Image: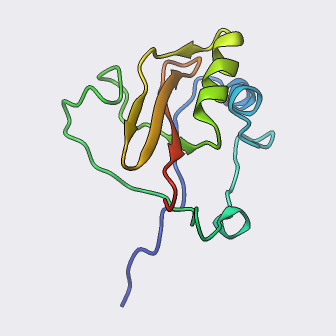
């Protein structure tokens, strides 16, 4: 049967891809190459307690969860220590939203990249 087996990528439009790649590399530690791409290999980073999953979720067109109404996508990055990363971003004068959220899935926080895209940061709960 022909079917989807996972998410192959998340793609963002950018006014200046090289600059935006540098921002993600320098501020969030995303190991982007000079062409603005990175591939995560879950088998290298997964453990029994943290299996390394990727979620595709659909939201209503009028959601406020993404921030500005013109933002059609939002990337969610798994992080190992949300509190420390948010403090690091604030120290670098990155726009960090004041609220965080704790749920059965883990802890969530948000920042905004230099092109105005809201970025979700997720510290997974054990077993996620």
Residue 106 located left or right of residue 17: left
| Residue drawn 33% across the image and 24% down it | 70
Tell me which residue sits at (43%, 37%) in the image.
74
Q: Judge from the rendering whether residue 99 lies leftward or rightward of residue 34; answer left or right.
A: left
* Left or right: where 123 falls relative to 18: left
Residue 21 location, x and y as percent?
Answer: 70, 32
Q: Position of residue 91 (x, y in %)?
A: 70, 11
Residue at the image point whose x is 41% and y is 74% from the top? 4
Among the 4 quarters of the image, the one containing residue 46: bottom right
| Location of residue 79 in the rendering, given as x and y in whole percent from the top left corner | 61, 42
64 or 9: nearer the viewer:
64
Choose top left, top right, bottom left or bottom right for residue 63. Answer: top left
- Residue 119 visible in image: no
Residue 10 x/y as whole percent: 52, 48
Residue toward you, 35 or 51 = 51
**Residue at x 59% of width, y 33% of height:** 82
Give residue 73's quadrant in the image.
Answer: top left
In the rendered image, is residue 74 in sight? Answer: yes
Query: Residue farthest to the bottom?
Result: 1
Considering only vertical position in the picture, is 76 above or below 46?
above
Q: Is residue 26 above or below residue 103?
A: above
């Amino acid at each position: 049967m022909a079917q989807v087996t996972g998410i192959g990528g998340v793609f963002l439009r950018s006014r200046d891809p090289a600059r935006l790649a540098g921002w993600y590399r320098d501020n969030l530690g995303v190991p982007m190459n000079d062409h603005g791409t990175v591939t995560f290999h879950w088998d290298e980073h997964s453990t029994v307690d943290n299996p390394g999953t990727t979620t595709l979720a659909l939201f209503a067109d009028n959601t406020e969860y993404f921030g500005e109404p013109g933002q059609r996508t939002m990337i969610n990055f798994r992080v190992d220590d949300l509190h420390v990363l948010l403090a690091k971003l604030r120290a670098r004068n990155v726009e960090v939203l004041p609220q965080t959220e704790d749920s059965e899935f883990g802890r969530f926080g948000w920042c905004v990249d230099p092109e105005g895209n809201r970025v979700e940061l997720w510290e997974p709960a054990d077993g996620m």
